[in-house]
Image (cartoon, coloured by chain):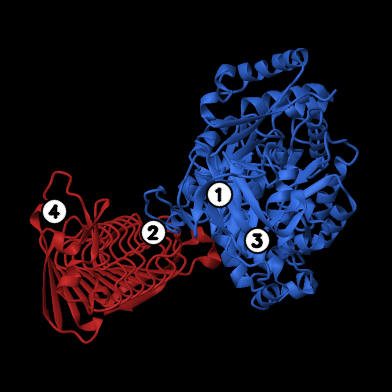
Chain colours: A blue, B red
Amino acid sequence: MVEELLIRNGVVYDPINGVNGEKKDICIRDGKVVEEVRNPKVIDAEGRVVMPGGVDIHAHIAGGKVNAGRLFRPEDGRKGREAKTKVCRAQSGYSVPNTFATGYRYAKMGYTFVMEAAMPPLAARHTHEEIVDIPILDNAALPLIDNNWMTMEYVKSGDTDLLAAYIAWMVKATKGYGVKVVNPGGTEAWAWAKNCDLNDAVPYFDVTPAEIVKGLAEATEKFEMPHSIHVHGNMLGHPGNYEVTTSTYDLVKGIKPYRDRPTMHATHTQFHSYGGTTWADFESKAGAIADYVNKNEHVSIDLGSVILGDTTTMTADGPMEYSLYQITGRKWTNHDVELETGSGITPFLYSGKVSVHTIQWAIGQELALLIKDPWKLALTTDHPNAGPFIGYPIIISMLMSKRRRDESAEDMHSAIYKRAELPSIDREYDLNEIAIITRGMAAKTLGLHEHGKGHLGVGADGDVAIYDLSPEEREAGKIQKAFLNTKYTIKGGEVVVKDGEVVAAPAGKTYFVTPECDEKLTEEMMTHLKDKFEHYYSVTFNNYPVQDAYVPNPYEIKAPWRS
Amino acid sequence: MQTIRLKLKEEITSGIAKIPVEVDSLTPDKLFGKNEAEIKAVKVWWGNKEENTGDLFDVSVEGEAASADEVKIVMEGDLSRVKHIGDGMKAGEIEALGDVDMHCGAMMQGGRVTVKGNADCWAGREMRGGELIIEGDAGDNLCAMYRGEMTGMTGGKVTVGGDAGECVGQYMAGGEILIKGNAGILTGLNMKGGKITIEGDAIMPGADMTGGEITVKGKVRDMMPSFKFVETATIEGEEYKKYLGDLAMMEKRAKGVLYVK
């Protein structure tokens, strides 16, 4: 039976197709946007804001460390508890919600795609198992390929082609989407109780983080990869790190991307935009970072904007979590992933009464307001590191209302007036810009717009968010409320949220990339790789790759070798 | 004065599984102003099912109350699988005639709960005010925090007629606990404030404490080596040694006071 849906008279914001607040009908047949429909079910969106389904470019929602975070924070599981309904499974958690709550809450905010931002390759199966348990959302995951021994050895020997072959194998073996970099070299150094700055040599391997980033960017661009390298740089969260950040951006400047996208996506940039030398003279350098991004085309960012309150920080950047634990004295856990990466977790409270947290809070928003072209940035909170994703509507309302920012600043530490720029910025986002940073930019940067995500052109997926919001609304509280619970969320042509309640919870798809590498090259790389498995890995080569059964709703994107 | 009698029907927890009943919806402040029929319709959890109070308990109401303070709930029957008695209660009185299950008086803010028997683990968990009297023994984690939280009891008064289990007052920040018998291992673990008195013996009291006061009138077994002797002090005519600790939490944070004989 043909399923048809007509969304009538909505005010549509579809920035990828240049639709900026036009009154327009959206027709969907069999889950896809079409020109017209004959006998549809009709949704009246009269006067309401209509956008494509949201696309989150970076969040930690599945896998080993998210689950470890849940286990290690039973007090977080006390929050957000909701009993099961006819449609929904039981929910719990705030900063580390269970898989079900993750799907429902994103869907209620109008999101339909979320990128799991850090998948340790060895834990890829676990990650995919959790992704399967996240209802409604389409997902993909980025495997960590930067602190791997194989990577560092190929960077050292300068064999970019072999590195590319290794990337191809790894992305395929993990059913991953691209190449994630987290504190390159530093996480390996952490296994030696050290950390690495951009130009420090990694213990034993004798390569620098700068060489790793450059090597991975060059190797990634050997393929027609939909997404560039996705980089969490060195010295995250350290005062004065902004110069490391811009130096990292410089590394990939000359590399030609396969299509019109940046060669580096720099993630949670808020944590990388710090001035000062200690926490005492800590200050915002968002201006310097924004200036760089404004002048260059080879780098895109996401915000990592802070949500005040309690959260659970978790990252593959093990040494950084240890520094954080030393500041707070709260509980901390650390994990080593053999030959590949590591991770750490510790709870954290962002308080508006603390000068450093206040400045961090300001930086995330400053970046959004100082970078002129919204196509260069995506809204994230690096969930849950700077705050849980459920706080996105707060950030949206701040960006759209200078008044709300000013009122909030008044209640916060006075450092915001001395060591941050936010109070002096007048810019306010409009709904079109919000649509860009919450769906358009992420879809384009991930290359998903070519696969039906993040827009409403003919052929796109029938993923639509209808907000109970008039385009003229300026009141921040009402904007926040509207973006937290949609009037309707439609996923693949099916109504999944109605009036802020989840009414259907279909399974989502898993997107993964298959880089296609020359056989001879693969064969040569394989001799090195098999040696690693024989001598060092605790699992065998044959047991390593994720089987197809772990991805029950696959969406494959092929990435041929660039001639 | 109004008395609400709730007698658990025998068949409810008589099965092999002894499925627990959770009664945090049955506090004086929540039942105040309701007549018998309305009380019978209040929902309580029985295992994973929500049931009417009237289906699980024989309910009778006597007298009138002008406020929740004048409401007294008397719970009868086999209460050993009845959890959350007086959980979150704000005013009035509850009397439980027998042994009760976990979380009795948890999150309590006011009023009084009297248990005429033993209370299982987590009694008085995160209690903020009011009074909890356990005439028999208390289980583990009396007046402690929920797993993972950093604050336990912050106010109110708890009296245990018998012994108490492990980790009494963990992360306690305020209020008073009196244990007339012995306490298990690690009383006042991570304690930050408030006062605990143990008339009997204790094992390793005060570990990781940074504030508050613990007095042990009986013997202390395995005294923490990380406490510093300060002076001798006289309490109620008896001589005690006063210690400060726990130095394992760094000297400047070691503000806990421990009195032992």
Q: Nearer the viewer, mark 4 or mark 1?
A: 1
Q: Amino acid at mark 4?
A: Ile
User: Of marks 1 and 3, which one's residue comes earlier in the chain?
Assistant: 3
Horizontal side, residue A69 vs residue A423: left or right: left
Residue hosting label 4: B12
Residue B146 disc label: 2
Residue A467 disc label: none
* Quarter containing the N terminus of chain B: bottom left
Measured in 3D between alpha carbons, the distance from the residue under mark 2 to the one under mark 4, in whole angstroms, is 28 Å
Measured in 3D between alpha carbons, the distance from the residue under mark 4 to the one under mark 3, in whole angstroms, is 50 Å
Measured in 3D between alpha carbons, the distance from the residue under mark 1 to the one under mark 3, in whole angstroms, is 29 Å
Camera-nearest residue between A75 and A138? A138
Q: Amino acid at mark 3?
A: Val
Quadrant of residue A291 within the rendered picture:
bottom right
- Point out residue B187 in the picture as x, y percentages from the top left corner: 34, 61
Number of other residues with Cα within 10 Å of mark 2, as a class: few under 14, some 14 to 19, many 20 or more: some
Measured in 3D between alpha carbons, the distance from the residue under mark 4 to the one under mark 1, in whole angstroms, is 45 Å
Residue hosting label 3: A306
- Residues indicated by labels 3 and 2 sit on the same polypeptide chain: no
Up/down of A29 relative to B119, above or below: above
Camera-nearest residue between B206 and A493? A493
